[in-house]
Image: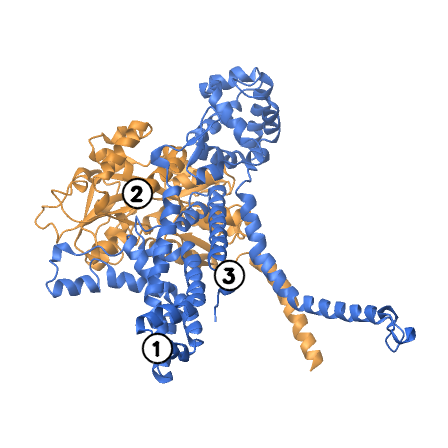
Amino acid sequence: MTDATVSPVGLMTSDGVPLKQSLARAERRSRIRAMMLVAPLFLFIMITFIVPIIDMLLRSVDNPRFQEVLPETAQVLMEWEGGGLPPESIYAVMAAEMKAAMKDRSLGRLTSRLNFEDPGMRTLMFKTARRLNRVDEGPWKEAMIKIDDEWGDPQVWALMKRTAPAYTTIHYLNAFDLTVSPEGEIVAQPEELQIYGLLFWRTIWMSLLITGLCALLGFPIAYLLATLPTKTSNLLMILVLLPFWTSLLVRTTTWIVLLQTEGVINDILVWATILNDDERIQMIYNQTGTIVAMTHILLPFMVLPLYSVMKTIDPSYMRAARSLGATQVTAFRRIYFPNTIPGLGAGGILVFILAIGYYITPALVGGRTGQLISNFIAFHMQESLNWGLGAALGAILLAGVLAMYWLYNKLIGVDNMKFG
Amino acid sequence: MKTRFLKTTALAAVLAFATVPAVQAADAITAVSWGGAYTKSQIEAYHKPFEAKTGIKINSQDYNGGLAEVRAQVEAGNVTWDVVDMELSDAVRGCDEGILEPLPLSDLPAAPDGTAAADDFIAGTLHDCAVATIVWSTIFSYDEEKYPGGSGPKTVADFFDTAKFPGKRGLRKSPKVNLEWALLADGVAADKVYEILATDAGVERAFAKLDTIKDDVIWWEAGAQPPQMLADGEVAMTSAYNGRVFNAVATEDKPFNIVWDGQVWDIDLWGIPTGAPNKDAAWDFIKFSTDTQRLADQASWISYGPARKSSAPLVGKHAVAGIPMGPHMPTAPENFTNAIQNDFAFWADYQDELTVRFNTWLAK
């Protein structure tokens, strides 16, 4: 009896290796093979996606300029306890390093950073460095204050001390319309410089509106696509896909042709004497323009997932509901619509996430009031060259999108989402 | 078969190595400028004769100004531009930040009468890292058909008067020039503009004046846009670069009128990004294109004033339209009566803050 049960440990393959070990080896081999197949894609995603995001996050707190250009000054400033004016030794280190920085033309990289904090710092730094070249010996405190009495102002030194560390939170503060007062407290920006709160809010509500409009317009189209006979629905499908394949720029400029004050629609309205020539409607270069053009451009991202989900809804469900006495409306509301939720969710989140980071279309047709946060990120990357602030705005946008995704998962469930 | 393959590969490798020094000796350089009629004037007056003389080809590329691209190229260590046409404030900042090469200005050719380059160039147009080519100006222009018979606007104050001169306005999407004009229209004298703009109250006052036309403005970004907006009837009057408007009038017969009152003039300069691939050829090109004759030639293609004094007497007629160019230059005495020189030192300090404030004002 006892002989009949063989313990699992004792199982051997024909060549005498324990079965468990052999199995593990075979599995490991196939795992490595699978990993090697995935490796190129993994590397690609790392290099083109993960690394840039990490770089952006680092850049938003990075503050290397002071330590690059005036390394020892940064060191002594950080050691200095602050308040009032620094001792002569700090003036001396700074004066020596400013001369050197002027000589190797690196001072400008620091002044452009300081000038973001306080306009006028650029002139002060260059003027001081230039004149210091003619001063050979101390006392440096007196010499610098003589060049410009700003150097006798504790607030300038507070700014210097604040800018010296290698990491900073100032970009995030600025991105929330906050700043640091000369006394070192976190305060709101003056009203005429408060812009990012407004832009984030505008980006969110416009993206939500565009998502809503896409759902409203896309639902009937997807329904027709899914229910019409193949011949007609194929034609309709081409009408959906053709714009989808057309260049974004072409579609955006087409809207300019249609909507501008001297454009097709206004011309027709004037020709039909609905409008007088001097009361043409401003439909583009404002929020309306952005909303119209973006809704059109993002519509396929709503239609396609909706269509693929509607295609799988068995028509017999509706027939069953009708035969059990539901009205057309009730049957749609209680049976058909709930079945389309996965598609609506997928389309909604696609459109919303694309809209929240949209850049080209608002830049071209948004005019003054239709600009979104991404346009200002681009502005800081390309024009003001305040890359730290641009990175901070980008990081906040990323966090916002992740939060939305989390919220969506809580409310509807990501597993419930169907792209096709 | 196999040996032939090997031979071809070897040959290709040899060629590849052989061409590296050839590239360094420069058979082509990349010149970057503002596009449209302006770049065309440079191609006709500088690029073509330079190519004919040296055999070095010039690839022309367009941009919208600013230092961002130069800085990105220098910081990435991948500089592809050899010579860039830029505004003075950018040339100064670029030089300070070390992203432009310092230039041996004493090598610049003297004027035909022997005057040294340093004296021949108009004061303030030579910089450590850049050599000026033109004096240009931001003016405003209107469509004569909309205001016939001399009833058009005559001063910057008229530009801000939408009651007397109804219609949309075009302005550059930048605080530059707009703030100066707002103060001018509000009664500040031309020589006091920057002094007042450096105070908080002055900035407040300028934005308050801009508020009065905010809803009537269409904002442009590229220099080619304003003449197009005028032609399309999108705006009744617009700020523009004087050469662009002149070109639309001279070569396309557009009925546009230039108002010189309150013109804000500035200079454009050639600079070389640090680490440019063909630095020597680029410097040769700058020396060639900024000699007396070349600068005068450019003025026959677009109405921007040459940066050398010795070029002025050589400026003749427009190369295509045959109009004498003299009266259309920003520096012509009758145009220059109420002019403001763009203050690069002011803008170097205040550009960051005022641009943020301007953008905030725009977005609200």
Specify the amino acid type for callout 1. Arg
Q: Mark 2 points at which residue?
A: B364
Identify by letter the chain in orange. Answer: B
Residue at left 39%, top 73%?
A241
Residue at left 47%, top 27%?
A185
Direction from residue B127 to residue B138 in the image, left or right = left
**Residue A276 locus on image (x, y percent):** 11, 58
Direction from residue A203 to residue A63 in the image, left or right = right
- The numbered disc on residue A414 is 3
Give the mark toward the camera: 1 or 2.
Answer: 1
How packed is label 1: few (under 14 Cα within 10 Å), some, or many (20 or more)?
some
Q: In this view, does B275 lie above or below A168?
A: below
**Residue A100 locus on image (x, y percent):** 58, 30
Q: Colour of chain A?
A: blue
Q: Name the residue under label 1.
A: A322
Along the line of sight, which residue is nearer the eye, A377 or B135?
A377
